[in-house]
């Protein structure tokens, strides 16, 4: 199921391949997980032999190349970053910027500072040039001067993608850290802005109607400004850059595709697809401590019921399903889910249902989150309730990991963000690598893909043992060890 997005800035199971013969083994460390994600990113990306750094055609004379550099100053900066000339980079960063008689067009991408600009022809940025060639000190310097870690060139690659292809792991780690810090700060700012707006009166909200509104997507932040100027035209936002959050989802008419292998919303975006079944089987195994029966399981988001079918085969003691869409709920009742002996179907938004479960004192051995059309702040809010829902110790939490799926480097950064957020709650998170292949034909009739690549990183969050120890026990341990 398409998952909540982070602010970074598939017919039958026989078509899919995934090793479900045993529970996926988690990687030994976060660094290993991130590195494997980055390696996968390199394998996904088409390698090109064209050098974007001041590339010239065989017919260009030295004078033509010099003229090209003068007409596009950013290329001089890119050349210095590519060659590792720290002195020249520092000089360019600190020299006064000339005021051109003619302002650059948007296509020239020449606004900002030398650290933030991009080549108008290739889309290459100074950070991409430095990362591609493994120059860690220059990458650090550029980031300190505001270089965007997630800027992409014309090949749809960012600095992290290029560093991964070159196996410059020090640069990769630097960029992952920079991206994670930036996204956590951006996420906090967005949350603050949303809370501020939600606290406004109706009159104050109306006064903001003509202000820019920012939509957060999985790969980029797109700002659309409303204008009343008759002569101004707005270019349509590409489908892949449109928000995946859908506040009106619960009011939409949803439908199955003709082959019943995908559940689609009114925009023909997929809510859930059959190709997910092997992944859902793996999730079910993890949530039940490797297929153990008589577990208490909570699933938020029924969709096509794939994971719930898998869970039922494992004979849970209690199986609570929260589903908010009325048409999905109607189908659940039609199929008899509400009449299963160990199943409790809760119709409504999880934001309204979970407080009731907490009030009843219900706790779970496994919790799974897989909603559709929600904001990334909803995921954070849900995870904040795990302390009251997930049994301690031994509880397992997981979610459908569709974070930032369009670019695997962004995906790695998004996973690291969630890992840090869960760590604050006392949960250790690992990502088990599951190999899966999705047939291109599976996307027929679907407006946009919500999954790319051949490796799915299944999140496994469990309570940190030190977090569960009471302050008195911790004190006693310190005394004993001394």
Image (spheres, rainbow, N blue to C red):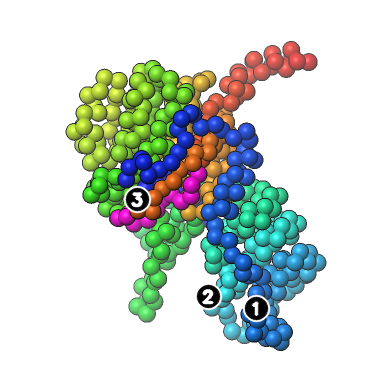
Marker disc for residue 56:
1
**Where residue 14 appears, x then y in whole percent?**
36, 41
Q: Are marks 3 and 2 in contact (CB under 8 Å)?
A: no
- SS of the residue under disc 3: helix
Cα separation, mark 2 vs mark 1, equals 20 Å
Q: How far apart are marks 3 and 2 (CA)?
A: 36 Å
The picture places residue 69, in percent across and down from the top left corner, at 68, 80
Q: Which residue is drawn at 35% across and 78% down?
A: 230
What segment carries the magenta color? 442-456
Q: Looking at the picture, does residue 197 appear above or below residue 283?
A: below
Classed neighbour count for the residue bearing mark 1: other residues with Cα under 10 Å, few (<14), some (14–19), many (≥20): some
Specify whether residue 145 is in view: no
Q: Mark 3 sits on what residue?
A: 442
Count residues near mark 3 (Cα–Cα under 10 Å), then give few for <14, some for 14-19, many for 20+.
some
Q: Which of marks 2 and 1 is nearer the N terminus?
A: 1
Asked if residue 129 is among those painted magenta in the image, a careful observer would answer no
Q: Nearer the viewer, residue 389 or 429?
A: 429
Above or below — where is 73 with respect to 424? Answer: below
Q: What element carries label 1?
A: loop
98 and 277: which is toward the camera: 277
Q: Mark 2 points at which residue?
A: 107
Q: Measured from the top left, where is residue 354 in percent x and y?
A: 37, 30
């Amino acid at each position: 199921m398409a998952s909540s997005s982070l602010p970074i800035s598939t017919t039958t199971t026989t078509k899919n391949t995934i090793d479900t013969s045993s529970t996926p083994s988690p990687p030994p460390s976060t660094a290993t997980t991130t590195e494997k994600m980055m390696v996968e990113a390199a394998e996904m990306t088409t390698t090109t032999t064209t050098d974007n750094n001041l590339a010239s055609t065989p017919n260009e004379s030295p004078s033509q190349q010099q003229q090209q550099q003068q007409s596009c100053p950013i290329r001089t900066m890119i050349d210095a970053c590519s060659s590792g000339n720290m002195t020249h980079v520092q000089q360019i960063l600190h020299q006064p910027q000339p005021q051109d008689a003619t302002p650059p067009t948007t296509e020239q991408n020449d606004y900002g500072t030398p650290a933030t600009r991009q080549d108008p022809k290739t889309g290459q940025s100074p950070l991409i040039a430095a990362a591609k060639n493994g120059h860690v000190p220059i990458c650090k310097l550029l980031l300190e001067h505001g270089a965007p870690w997630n800027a992409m060139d014309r090949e749809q690659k960012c600095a992290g993608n290029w560093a991964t292809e070159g196996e410059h792991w020090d640069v990769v780690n630097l960029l992952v850290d920079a991206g994670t810090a930036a996204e956590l700060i951006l996420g906090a700012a967005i949350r603050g802005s949303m809370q501020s707006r939600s606290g406004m009166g109706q009159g104050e909200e109306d006064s903001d109607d003509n202000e820019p509104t920012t939509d957060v997507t999985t790969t980029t932040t797109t700002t659309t400004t409303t204008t009343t100027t008759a002569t101004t035209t707005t270019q349509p936002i590409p489908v892949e850059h449109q928000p995946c959050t859908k506040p009106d989802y619960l009011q939409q008419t949803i439908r199955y595709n003709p082959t019943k292998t995908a559940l689609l919303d009114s925009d023909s975006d997929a809510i859930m697809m059959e190709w997910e079944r092997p992944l859902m089987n793996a999730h079910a195994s993890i949530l039940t401590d490797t297929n153990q029966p008589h577990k208490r399981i909570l699933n938020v988001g029924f969709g096509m019921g794939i994971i719930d079918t898998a869970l039922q085969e494992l004979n849970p003691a209690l199986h609570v399903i929260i589903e908010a869409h009325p048409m999905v709920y109607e189908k659940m009742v039609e199929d008899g889910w509400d009449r299963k002996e160990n199943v409790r179907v809760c119709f409504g938004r999880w934001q309204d249902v979970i407080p009731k479960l907490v009030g009843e004192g219900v706790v779970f051995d496994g919790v799974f989150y897989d909603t559709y059309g929600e904001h990334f702040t909803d995921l954070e809010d849900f995870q904040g309730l795990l302390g009251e829902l997930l049994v301690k110790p031994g509880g397992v939490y997981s979610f459908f990991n569709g974070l930032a799926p369009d670019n695997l480097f962004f995906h790695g950064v998004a996973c690291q963000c969630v890992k840090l957020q869960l760590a604050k709650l006392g949960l250790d998170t690992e990502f088990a690598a599951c190999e899966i292949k999705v047939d291109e034909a599976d996307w027929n009739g679907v407006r946009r893909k919500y999954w790319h690549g051949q490796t799915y990183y299944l999140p496994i969050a469990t309570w940190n043992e030190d977090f569960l120890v009471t302050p008195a026990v911790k004190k006693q341990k310190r005394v004993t060890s001394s």
